[in-house]
Amino acid sequence: MRKNNWACFLLILAGIVIGGFIGSLFPSTWLNYGQSFGLSSPLILDLGILCITFGLSIKITIASILGIAAAIVIYRFI
């Protein structure tokens, strides 16, 4: 039986979100240790009538990495 790639993608996203939530519950532990990267200030495109703001910031923590690993293990058992 062929596994669905969308299910894997959604499980990994859920693992990232749940891992980030667990990391924020314990802010002074090793679970919340990580690195942030992305745009430090948003990019603003002003076209006169329309103003568009672009921004992206990603924080990878130990808890989110553990969440990704748990999601992959769960996906293998589905």
Image: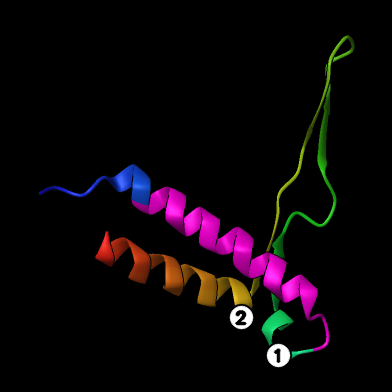
Q: Viewer-proximal residue, 10 or 59?
A: 10
Report whether 4 appears left or right of 16.
left
Pointer 1: what residue? Answer: 30
64 part of magenta stretch: no
Seen at 84% across and 14% down, the residue is: 50
Secondary structure found at label 2: helix
**Residues at circles 1 and 2 in contact by the CB criterion of under 8 Å:** yes
Pointer 2: what residue? Answer: 62
As measured in the structure, the alpha-carbon distance from the residue carrying label 1 to the one carrying label 2 is: 7 Å
Residue at the farthest front position: 78
Report whether 32 appears left or right of 17.
right
Q: Viewer-proximal residue, 6 or 78?
A: 78
Residue range (magenta): 8-28
| Rendered-image quadrant of the C terminus | bottom left
Report whether 70 appears left or right of 58.
left
Please name the amino acid that badge 1 sits on: Trp
Name which quarter of the figure residue 37 lies in: bottom right
Image location (x, y in percent) of residue 16: 57, 62
Please name the amino acid that badge 2 sits on: Ile
